Image (cartoon, rainbow, N blue to C red):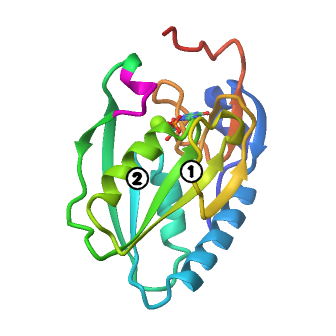
Amino acid sequence: MNHFFPPEQYGALHDGISEILYSAEEIQQRVMAMGQMITRDYEGCHPLLVGVLKGVFPFMSDLLRTITIPVEVDFIAIASYSAETRHQGVVRLQKDLDRPIKGRHVLFVEDVVDTGLTLNYLLKNLRAREPASLKVCALFNKQRRRLISIPVQYQGFELPDKFVVGYGLDYRELYRNLPFVGLLKPAVFQPEKE
Ligand code: IMP
Ligand code: MG
């Protein structure tokens, strides 16, 4: 069992949070349940978990250790080209997978599915490499923001149409180290100008 400090101990970071949406304990419990489902569904399949850096790393790390069958992990890293291409979900691969996935059972692991544009683009890219299967596991879902319908086979929590931080999710690279997920105070959050 993971142990975390109480939220107040995160001082200046905690001061920027207006509301905790999911506590560290709730997240750990849900991740454990997701890992058990994956363990059951992928028994005998030797799956490969693929994550997108950096936001996914705490979730990937916790999820991985709740899966009790043989499993491999790989990561890709992406960067948006520009404001214009971002709206089409077109991204540049900064780091590709280390190994081919042809014939492998691939589980794509995401922190949050928002518009779905990035995920849609990446799934197309992976599908072209002919995996035996390709499913999606996302800890957080913002259904109301979805622009492209994407089946998510394993889902953790629903989020409101608001900007959240913590558990890997950042605001200007900060707040990733919070073990819980919460809303930023309006005084802290300034939406990016496009
Ligand atoms: P989309 O689904 O293409 O819109 O992009 C999803 C990505 O945007 C996620 O992988 C996150 O990196 C980022 N993202 C979306 N919503 C949030 C949020 O509320 N906080 C922090 N990052 C977010
Ligand atoms: Mg991100």
Q: Residue at x 63, y 26 (%)?
A: 12
Q: Position of residue 181 (x, y in %)?
A: 67, 42
Q: Residue at x 62, y 29 (%)?
A: 13
Above or below — where is 15 with respect to 2?
above
The quadrant the N terminus occupies is: bottom right
Q: Residue at x 40, y 77 (%)?
A: 47
Provide the secondary structure element on which disc 2 rests.
helix
Q: Is residue 104 left or right of residue 11?
A: left
Tag of residue 123: 2
Q: Position of residue 37 (x, y in %)?
A: 63, 77
Above or below — where is 2 with respect to 167?
below
Disc 2 vs disc 1: Cβ atoms closer than 8 Å?
yes
Which residue is situated farthest in the bottom direction here? 44
Provide the secondary structure element on which disc 1 rests.
loop
Q: Amino acid at mark 1?
A: Ile
Foreground: 170 or 84?
Answer: 84
Mark nearer the N terminus (2 vs 1): 2
- Say whether residue 136 is magenta: no
Q: Amino acid at mark 2?
A: Leu
Q: Position of residue 59 (x, y in %)?
A: 53, 56
Structural crowding at the residue carrying mark 1, measured as other residues with C-alpha within 10 Å and reported as few (<14), some (14–19) or many (≥20): some
Q: Is residue 188 left or right of residue 69?
A: right
Q: Position of residue 93 (x, y in %)?
A: 26, 41
* Residue beneath disc 1: 150
Q: Is residue 155 left or right of residue 56?
A: right
What kind of secondary structure does the magenta stretch mostly adopt? loop
Image quarter where ligand 1 lies: top right
Q: Residue at x 37, y 51 (%)?
A: 124
Numbered range of the magenta stretch: 85-90
Structural crowding at the residue carrying mark 2, measured as other residues with C-alpha within 10 Å and reported as few (<14), some (14–19) or many (≥20): some
Foreground: 2 or 109?
Answer: 109
Whether residue 54 can be seen here: no
